[in-house]
Amino acid sequence: MNALPVVVIGAGPQGLAAAAHLLERGLVPLVVEAGTGPGSAVFEWGHVRLFSDWSELVDASAARLLAPTGWATPAKGYPTGAQWVSQYLAPLAAVLGDRVRYGTRVTGVGRKGPDGLVDSGRAGRPFAVHVTDAAGAESRIDARAVIDASGTWAQPGPAGADGLPALGERAASEHLSYRIPDFADPEPFAGRHTVVVGSGHSAATAVNELVRVAKRHPATRITWVLRRGTVGNTFGGGDADELPARGALGARAREAVEAGIVDLVTGFRIESVTGTDGGAVLASEDGRELPVAHRVVVLTGFRADLSFLSELRLELDPTLQAPVRIAANVDPKVHSCGSVRATGASDLAHPEADFYLVGAKSYGRAPTFLALTGYEQVRSVVAALAGDHAAAARTQLVLPDTGVCGGSGTFDVSGEGDGGNCCTPSPTLIQIGRAPTSV
């Protein structure tokens, strides 16, 4: 078993950091990545600027691995996703070399030999990680442990109010997008009507970028749709946010709404999407309809893909789909990103020994994840795999307070307000605007 690699699924920030920690501990990492290069998912939102600065985006072990090459943490500032990849993740992957395999998609993880029903000797057997390459050829990798850092980017939430695609949503998909668009080319939005669906930081980012377009092209119309009955904490923590860029994001969105540049529609729980020649019409469960939208930008969060883990014995919270021991600590009805405590190997462990979900995927459907949280997770998990249980149990993380509380908690049908204490949803890290026009 000790001669086998620890397979890390995903070559994003947490996956590559895990590989660095494994090397530092004398273990053998093998990172498998479905994309064609490091940080493939990050690169897809490369035009978006993060609300965390460089000091919060670099893992300590990764920095130590890079140091002999002359690399140093970039100067203080807020990089775009593309800059995060080119200035940090790509150099880190280059140092890791052939320990990272691209174009390798995991299709299943189990134990070598027994299926999920077998108890006897289970923990002593290697993992069997089934993969396909870019040409579709299948193979199997034996592993002593598996760290799943594959994230949630591939599974965005739908527009439908009940968590399922709205009636007609799939049929009208040519008019919908589920990522923050690149507004470097304003032509698709200038002088047209765009609807943004969602109440988190990604939605606020899209709204603010559309406001830039509207100021140059006054005929542009922007509608911002919230499922919740009141505005609640949609505009974030403002000056109370210890991540200033994130606080400024919500403040700008508020100004645009108050100035009448953005039409804010609350309590609009989407039941159907009807495609037309010019766009799509959204209808709510209470019978309201919005004017035809040329483009609908759906930013309702992300979900973990658990389909290839069906032969493993996982212990997940039924609501958040996060490991049960961290679910209460990341629940957005209670916590913001800053009030979430650090989580380590003991919190992330499952009945399936030596298997761990880390990074955004470990938070399931909770949007309170930060890069620093993930780096602390992989540090602790790798320490546990190396047998250093004292280091695994030690906490080495202090998170900035978000100042964002009191949000969308309870199910809201009447429109009388939002219940509970929760943070403003913010899918992973993305936030402030493209590089050429960042503010």
Image (cartoon, grey):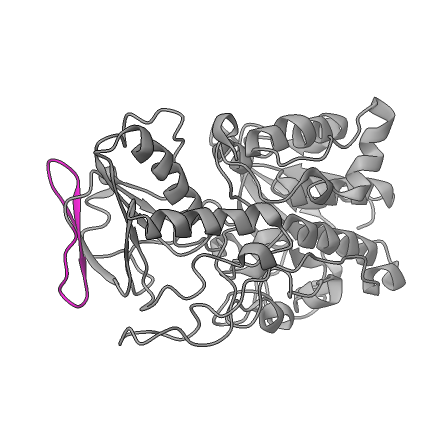
Residue 172 horizontal/vertical position (percent): 20, 44
**Relative to 129, residue 117 above or below:** below
Q: Residue furthest front?
A: 259
**Relative to 358, residue 322 above or below:** below
| Front one among 264 and 284 | 264
Kindly indicate the quadrant of the structure image that contains residue 142: top right
Q: Residue furthest left?
A: 277
Kindly indicate the quadrant of the structure image that contains residue 9: top right
Kindly indicate the quadrant of the structure image that contains residue 272: bottom left
Residue 191 colored magenta?
no
The residue drawn where x is 24% and y is 35% is 220
The residue drawn where x is 39% and y is 54% is 300
Q: Is residue 146 visible to the viewer in this orientation of the structure? A: no
The residue drawn where x is 54% and y is 62% is 404
Q: Is residue 18 visible to the viewer in this orientation of the structure? A: yes
The residue drawn where x is 65% and y is 72% is 325
| Front one among 60 and 303 | 60
Residue 194 horizontal/vertical position (percent): 26, 41
- How many circles with numbers are drawn on the protein? 0
Residue 124 horizontal/vertical position (percent): 75, 61
Task: Please state the extent of the stretch shown in magenta in the rendering.
Answer: 274-290
**Relative to 346, residue 225 above or below:** above
| Front one among 297 and 380 | 297
Residue 220 horizontal side relative to residue 339, left or right: left
Residue 330 horizontal/vertical position (percent): 59, 66
**Relative to 386, residue 95 above or below:** above
